[in-house]
Amino acid sequence: MPEGLSAAEVGKEIAEHKEHAEHRTGGHSRHDRLISIAEAVLLSAVALLAAWSGYSAAKWGSESSLSLAKASATRTEANRFDIEATQIRTLDAVKFNSAFGAYATGNMKLFQLAVNRFRPGYRAAFDAWVATHPLKNPKARPDPSDLPQYRIAEEVQGQALDAEADAQFKEGESATGTSDKYVRLTVLLAAILFLIGISSHFPVRAARYGLIATACALLVVSVAQLATLPGPPA
């Protein structure tokens, strides 16, 4: 679906306007010729604005697609880290249960062997948990994984990637909104081209002037909207 006006369409519109204007103003007053010139100038200016608006809409649409694609890829990578973190957490729990079972049965050799097999990130939390005397202290945490010392690098990385994916998704949504605004502006500019293009077909001057005045008012609104929109991304 095209988002702007093609050069061929604009050229055809201006040529048709010129043909009708020359047919109507041949032998007429200088005032009519000046009005025709003003209409042609307006057509050219609006055509340039429409081309710029269509170009900007396409660029922001591409920017939106890229941002959303990055967000999807980042989210996939974050899910991979989350899965790995869940697996590590499960293995930590299994090893802790093995050590706890060995301690409960009084097999200290097996208990020490199980503790030595803890991964470094879990060993720090386990040592901190043991320091709280969990067998005597009713306020001690029931498990080392409940302590702040418990760290899983993959879990932290997954959270960071999730936040990055959220930011990229918001950027994509914002770019989509900007693209939609440029598309609406292009449609408004097309309406202005239509009004100016048909103005020369009306034999009644009042109708012609009314169409031109309406087109000028819409052009002012369009320029005001264009001034509030960001330029196309690099």
Image (spheres, rainbow, N blue to C red):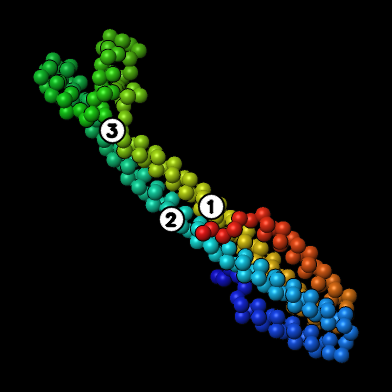
Q: Is residue 216 left or right of residue 139?
A: right
Three-letter residue code for mark 1: Glu
Secondary structure beneath dot 1 equals: helix
Question: Residue 192: percent from the left, percent from the top?
Answer: 73, 70
Of discs 3 and 1, which sits in the foreground? 1
Instruction: Give the alpha-carbon distance from disc 3 to disc 2, as whole Å.
Output: 30 Å
Secondary structure beneath dot 3 equals: helix
Question: Residue 196: percent from the left, percent from the top?
Answer: 76, 75
Badge 1, how many Cα within 10 Å: few under 14, some, many 20+? some
Q: Is residue 35 left or right of residue 80?
A: right
Three-letter residue code for mark 2: Ala
Q: Which of these two is toward me, 4 or 79?
A: 4
Secondary structure beneath dot 2 equals: helix
Instruction: Give the alpha-carbon distance from disc 3 to disc 1, as whole Å.
Output: 35 Å
Residue visible at 69% across and 68% down in the picture: 189
* Among numbered discs 3 and 2, the one appearing first in the sequence: 2
Query: In what quadrant of the picture does the N terminus appear?
Result: bottom right
Three-letter residue code for mark 3: Arg
Residue visible at 83% across and 79% down in the picture: 34
Q: Is residue 153 left or right of residue 206?
A: left
Instruction: Give the alpha-carbon distance from disc 1 to disc 2, as whole Å.
Output: 12 Å
**In this figure, which residue is indicated by the disc labeled 3?**
89
* Among numbered discs 3 and 1, the one appearing first in the sequence: 3
Q: Quadrant of residue 228?
A: bottom right
Q: Quadrant of residue 28?
A: bottom right
**In this figure, which residue is indicated by the disc labeled 2?**
69
Residue visible at 69% across and 80% down in the picture: 13
Q: In the rendered structure, are the residues bearing label 1 and label 2 in contact, judged by CB atoms less than 8 Å apart?
A: no
**In this figure, which residue is indicated by the disc labeled 1?**
173
Q: Is residue 25 above or below residue 44?
A: below
Q: Is residue 76 above or below residue 233?
A: above
Badge 3, how many Cα within 10 Å: few under 14, some, many 20+? some
